[in-house]
């Protein structure tokens, strides 16, 4: 009996070892393609939330990092892409995170001009409930387009909430937690930018250096 158990245990261990090796091989062969696709998708989004006709530099090559867990919802440093025209700041796109989504963190990116007007917002990743919380995706709902063109100022900060909380943005039927978390991350980031966006253009461009340390 013990010999049979030992045999079965060894077979199970061998099977697990082969599966682990296969996963490692697949991951090794696809990680560069996945990263390239993610970069392509990011560039597509950057073009959507920071219009090409207002800047003359390549956003993905003008990236700096921001770090403030209380503002950006994560201990990680996040990228901010700086748009300039004739060398002068005109806008930026900054990643942030809502850590309190219904099913975990929601990553989003906000495009904003130097007067504080939102140029566009897109969701980068989330695990919200399909059919309810996933309306934060533009492919599922136009909800994120409601932010476009909205000026932010701390005097009108209270407006940046769902209507249920006294703000001016729609919540989702049966899923208030998701848009509430999304708006909280958005308004916190916009409030931070109101006093820090100018200084971002004086920071070193070092996103590529950080990627090289991965």
Image (cartoon, helix red, strand yellow):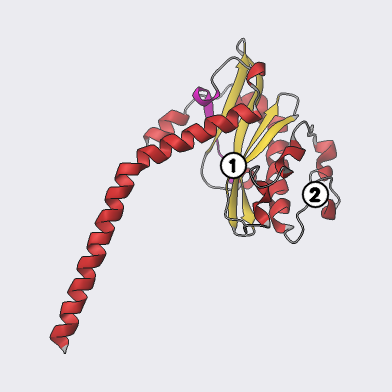
Residue toward you, 116 or 111: 111
Residue 28 higher or lower than 66, as above or below: below
Give the residue number, with chain letter if any, for mark 1.
68
Examine the image and state in which quarter residue 101 appears.
bottom right
Mark sitting earlier along the chain (1/2): 1
Callout 1: SS: loop
Q: What span is in magenta?
A: 59-69
Q: Disc 1 versus disc 2: distance between alpha carbons?
A: 28 Å
Residue occupied by mark 2: 170
- Residue drawn at x 72%, y 59% as measured from the top left: 175
Q: Are marks 1 and 2 in contact (CB under 8 Å)?
A: no
> What's the residue at 53%, 34% (across, down)?
42
Visible residue check, residue 195: yes
Q: Position of residue 187 (x, y in %)?
A: 73, 42
Q: Secondary structure at mark 2?
A: loop
Residue 206 located within the stretch drawn in magenta: no
């Amino acid at each position: 009996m013990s010999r049979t158990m030992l045999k079965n245990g060894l077979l199970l261990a061998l099977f697990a070892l082969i599966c682990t090796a296969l996963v490692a091989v697949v991951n090794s062969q696809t990680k560069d393609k996945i990263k390239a696709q993610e970069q392509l998708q990011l560039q597509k989004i950057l073009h959507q939330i920071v219009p090409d006709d207002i800047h003359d530099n390549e956003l993905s090559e003008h990236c700096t990092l921001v770090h403030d867990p209380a503002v950006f919802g994560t201990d990680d440093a996040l990228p901010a892409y700086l748009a300039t025209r004739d060398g002068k700041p005109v806008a930026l796109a900054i990643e942030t995170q809502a850590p309190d989504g219904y099913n975990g963190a929601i990553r989003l990116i906000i495009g904003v001009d130097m007067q504080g007007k939102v140029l566009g917002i897109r969701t980068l990743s989330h695990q919200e409930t399909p059919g309810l919380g996933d309306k934060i995706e533009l492919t599922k709902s136009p909800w994120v387009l409601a932010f476009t063109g909205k000026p932010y100022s701390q005097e009108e900060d209270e407006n940046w909430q769902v209507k249920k909380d006294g703000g001016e943005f729609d919540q989702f039927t049966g899923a208030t937690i998701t848009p509430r978390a999304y708006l909280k991350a958005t308004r916190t980031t916009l409030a931070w930018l109101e006093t820090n966006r100018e200084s971002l253009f004086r920071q070193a461009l070092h996103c590529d250096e950080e990627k090289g340390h991965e």
